[in-house]
Amino acid sequence: MSRLPTGGLVDRNQPLRFSFDGKSYQGFQGDTLASALLANDVTLVGRSFKYHRPRGILTAGSEEPNALVTLRSGARAEPNTRATTIELYDGLTASSQNRWPSLGFDLMAVNGLFSPLFVAGFYYKTFMWPAAFWEKLYEPIIRRAAGLGALSMLPDPDSYDADHGFCDLLVVGAGPAGLAAALTAARAGKRVFLVDEDSRMGGRLLAELHEIDGDDGRRWVDRTIAELAACPRVTLLPRTVLFGAYDGGVYGAVERVSDHLPTPLPGQPRQRLWKIVATRAILATGAIERPLVFAGNDVPGVMTSSAVQAYVRRWSVLPGKQVVFFTTCDSGWKAVHDLLRAGVIPAAIIEARAHVAPDVKALAGAVPSFLGAQIIGTRGGKRLKGVDLRDAQGRTWRLDADVLAMAGGWNPAVGLGCNLGARPRWSDELNAFLLDHPPAGMAMAGAAAGQFGLGAALASGIAAAAEFGTMAAPRTSDDPADGRPLWHVPHRRGKAFVDYQHDVTDSDVALAAREGFTSVEHMKRYTTLGMATDQGKMGQVNGNALLAQATGKTMAEAGTILSRPPYLPVAIGTLAGHHRDEHFRPVRQTAGHGWAAEQGAVFTDAGQWKRAQWFPKAGERDWLESVCREVNAVRTGVGICDVSTLGKIDVHGPDAGALLDRLYINTFSTLPVGKARYGVMLREDGFVMDDGTTSRLADDHFFVTTTTVNAAKVMQHIDYARQVLWPELDVQATSVTEQWATYAIAGPQSRALLAALLPELDLSNEALPYMGALSFRWLGVSARLFRLSFSGELAYELSVPASHGDRLIRALFELGRAFDAVPYGTEALGVMRIEKGHAAGNELNGQTTAADLGMGRMMSTKKDFIGRVMAQRPALTDAARPVLVGLKPVDPAARLRGGAHLLPKGADAIAANDQGHVTSVAYSPTLGHWIGLALLAKGASRHGERIIVHDPVRGADVEVEVCHPVFVDLEGVRVRG
Amino acid sequence: MRFSIFNLAAHALTGHRRWTPSWRDASPKAGYDVVIIGGGGHGLATAFYLAKVHGITNVAIVEKGWIGGGNAGRNTTIIRSNYGLPGNEPFYEWSMKLWEGLEQALNYNAMVSQRGVLNLCHSDAQRDAYARRGNAMRLHGVDAELLDRNQVRAMAPFMNFDNARFPIQGGLLQPRGGTARHDAVNWGYARAASALGVDIIQNCEVTGLLTDNQGAMTGVETNRGPIRAGKVGMAVAGNSSRLAAMAGLRLPIESHVLQAFVSEGLKPVIPGVITFGAGHFYISQSDKGGLVFGGDIDGYNSYAQRGNLPVVQDVCEGGMALMPMIGRARLLRSWGGIVDMSMDGSPIIDHAPVPGLYLNAGWCYGGFKATPASGWCFAHLLATDTAHETATAFRLDRFATGDLIDEKGQGAHPNLH
Amino acid sequence: MRIPCPHCGTRESQEFVYRGDAAPVRPADDGAMFDYVYLRDNVAGVMREHWYHAQGCRQWIVVTRDTRSHAIDHAEFAR
């Protein structure tokens, strides 16, 4: 055990059991998996992506590139999870990834032997011969070898929540700068959101030893959080990653509600997606320590200095017995100091700088130091055994060490500030990329703004919140924060890694530069540096520096990558929230849905609506038998169909008729009150947009219907016409689709059934002729009756308020028993409309003109309407266009299928002979064979011709006769009956 | 320098110190026979085919940033030729044929991987629409298979077959569809074009077009000085309107932002490309293991190469609805590309109404798959002043004549295509 | 992106339907119709554009927005 006897922020009274790769261990409440593994002397935790090199824990934070494990098992298995951010819970299980057969003995490490071949971009140069081998041989091998962890392949059993936050100030990061900023605004009474990715707020104050206002820095953190928590307008969100900044002051964040528990508590989500709308945001996101690039810098035991400091101070874990520091900046010395204060005596400090300030040197006490020295190599395979160094005089030394702490300087975490396109600038003074000009509404504070000392960080937090208020800066000693970058230690042997996870080395970057990939973006893409799960948090700046050196550029000239969301990877399930499975999209049900369900209806989706497709009866073999029965019942008796999903729009006002005249190709201003008319509307480009009947209920009141799928689109179109195109028209339009329940009552017996329901109405042909409309009251509520027919039979559409829809459908069938009334669904509706040659969705596909559908003559020449001009373009009036025809199979037993194409008889099945396609098909019980509607080139003049219906994706060709698209009652006698 | 495993091994012996730049980083000369504006995949491919097929090597590509930095490097790398309309299908199939021989033609492994493209359908009407498209493909000699629910289930059993809002009924499969490595395509074309003498000029932004007193193109003005040109071709997705405006043209194009996403690396799960039209979601898995996925464009005009959260959520909702086993996989990177959405959803490869200026534009969100054929056909137009036989429909005047190529039937609303 | 609807107040953009550039005006002259329907300035910069508050007040509004930064200056009713 490497747990120090005292100290740290773990609760030694709460021991927790956990297992890694099947072996059991113990940690404490407050541990991360990484700290608990280190406390149990487990240092080998993963294998690298390409060479399968042994890898240990490199950091103590979310930037960890090496220690990726699969957390949990079964359906809750969570691959690629950073051990450094996993909060330990009792019973936790985790396993290592991307190794075979085991982490300790990984046969894939043979890749390392081929590393002279597997340089950056090697695959672009080979695997090309023979061409057919790529998919069959090379690629499957590459794919199997690639990837990190594995998905469980089981549906995610957890749920996810979403919430919205609105605030004056969003503070990202609850380190000293963030706490100071939040406190400043909170004391001014502002609405503040303070989010931090860690389970515990405090940032580096949890890991470093500091005094604030004469007290331990951690106690200042506790006091500050207590004060913030007591402010009713402050929301504290620990365990929350702010992953992206979006337009309009919108920020995305993920709260890990239950990840620190074995499973979510009942009723609790696993995670919660926050959309935070903030007037101002302060990014106090800290800085990430840079590793140093030298040979063997990836042996387990090599860690960042700040991580060693955190493990010792926060988790009271000593990651090794002989700790050597390799530093280029003062923070490394401060880490040594903090270790000494915790009773840990480092073995040596190797400082790349030739000189350090005396007060800095004093931080290390009696620890031996080498100034002007560099580490030139490491020893050890699965565990660091020692380091080789060259001192200022050029002498080489060999030191034993099982931990090497690298202090390579700091990269301010400016990524979120770049999400909206702001570019970071290299500061030669601070040796860091800084965001001098964050987007409007955003400010940087603390280490993220290059304020590396504690006093400076606190002051910058207060200053960033100055517009809200001010407060006195807490008293603190300021740390030395000097440093000089050491980008690279030259070496002859071994590998020096820049991107740990992707195994990108210094020589890969050099190779990229040699091959002309000299922009940072090209280098990134060629070497894959920065594309691992840490997204370049560890290696990007080092890589930029090596590229700059290789190309003779300055850091500023080389530049860097622009960070995009997410700042840290986000579970897809979290972003989807509850929109999954049957809740993916809302379900819309008509007022008659319950009744239809009671009848055993089979439902189908029509957009978000559920519609009864058919109503099977006991003993019926298949859907076709049910549908044929329903059709026959309508054609011989009476049937009832719920058509409530059709779009319905009330158009009111003195200019209602004038507006409709401009929306439809035909004329509505001349429609008498009490009459309905079928209308077709075009898009402005001259193609058909929608169709439907419109009734005039009063001089200044029209009732427009649309197809189900276009209801919202037509409403928007009408509003555009009256608000934007012709605001001078005095007309209002209101969508009433949901307000009315509408049933089609169709068949020779429909009048008799309605007469039984509505004995007070005169339903005679004289009083309510075909295409007549009337308003009345039924059970004390408004009702509308239209004599319309989609089926081609004597038929009506009866509308009542949706609140009475259920009552009406039950009343209709109660009375309908005397007439053997049947319910019919969308299939029977579709069969009858095909028999009648009515165009519907398959024909109104956005590619057809009114003339294509046989309605060219409806286009008024006496008025302007939307689409009139563009409909006159040559290609839209070409006589060779496919137009609507009917199709009958020559063999009456043959089945037709939608989507088949049309070929002249005897012609080769090639595209040049393609003359159109089948749009809709149905088995017609009325005719006793399959029928189809089709769009056929020059079809109007080809009735009687025999052609081939060609359907290679489903099977055989069928010979058909072209005919008029109206198969039943061409003269329209029945509808007028 | 030829690429092969033997060559690679030989270089390994010298520590890879003898590799030379993949393409010459050229400085502009005073003039060229052809100047291509835009160093994306289409521009690079155009230059390569001009040199290779037509022997025109006095060619420059001028690129304002680094080659492949626009949509050519910001896409989901899908290749397919599953179009329904006769104006499109021969062109995309020609592109597919060029993909199939690309690596040998370029001596560069672009990881062209034909693991199949599957479009799912969820209703009878959708199935018939796919049948219409599949039959059209077959009539053009292209592979297409209409699968039923069980066949789809056999291919991708991890999808939501039991509990879905919009149950999967089947799908249209193009087995030859798949993916390619986008950067490698760009670099492969650049390397091959450069080897044939083409000048690739990076960090060279066109600031104006030069014309003679008759209004004909004579070259381009750039931040690195004027460059004379016999012909000027523009292939600048995301900037077509801005560049055309320099010639006084307005185009039937709006620029929109399209986002795409990739997950952390995972062991192989997704066999090919799967599209879920009803949910506005599509997905594949890269050779590195990342799930590569996307959905609809954000829907508003944009020149900012980034989108917003609603579409991120919408896409992930589609993903979870289709395959709820990806819930615990994490989205690692997102990016936004500016796509030039044309008024009918199809591209333009044509003369501009300015003598000497040629347009390659309006690729919407589908330019990547078109890269080889776009280059081939644009080179053909630049070299011969006639449209290539597979690209005759991509005329600029089709909007005036009404000969639209509107696969989705959405009309002149670019954000709906 | 958040849109300051003049009727409803500032709302998330997904409540709205986008149409595009508000500059083209439907012409009385047939000969100008092609330009109106098909050609766009496709402004890179500040643009006045039509949005429809479909999930709110159902008003068409004109939003003044920079297409390069998505920064919204203001919005007004279209009518």
Image (cartoon, helix red, strand yellow):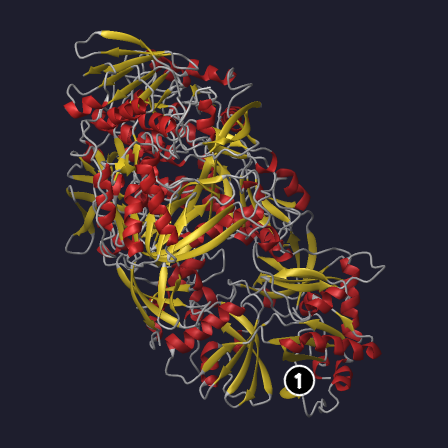
Q: Is residue B296 left or right of residue A902?
A: left
Q: Residues within 10 Å of mark 1 (few under 14, many from 20)?
A: many
Question: Residue at the spot x=24%, y=34% of the render?
Answer: B199
Q: Position of residue C24 (x, y in %)?
A: 32, 69
Q: Nearer the viewer, residue A514 or C54?
A: C54
Q: Specify the farthest residue to the right.
A: A619
Q: At which x and y percent is residue A623? A: 76, 58
**In the displayed structure, would residue A463 be above or below residue B410?**
above
Question: Camera-side residue: B241 or A615?
Answer: A615
Is B286 placed above or below A803 here? above
Please provide percent x and percent y for residue B295. Answer: 47, 49
Q: Secondary structure at mark 1?
A: loop
Marked residue chain, label 1: A
**Vertical position of residue B104 compared to residue B225: above or below:** above
Kindly identify the amino acid type of the residue bearing the numbered disc 1: Tyr
Q: Is residue B282 left or right of residue A873?
A: right
Residue appearing at x 39%, y 71% in the figure: C8
Give the quarter of the figure containing the C terminus of chain A.
bottom right
Does residue A956 appear to the left or right of A286 in the view shown? right
Residue with the mark numbered 1: A770
Observer-nearest of A189 and B204? A189
Q: Is residue A264 visible?
A: yes
Q: Residue at image x 55%, y 28%?
A: A17
Task: Tell me, yes or no, if residue B307 can be seen here.
Answer: no
Classify residue B250 by image quadrant.
bottom left
Q: Quadrant of residue A58?
A: top left
Among the 4 quarters of the image, the one containing residue B99:
top left
Q: Position of residue A243 (x, y in %)?
A: 39, 45
The extreme front residue here reads A214
- Above-or-below relation of C48 to A191: below
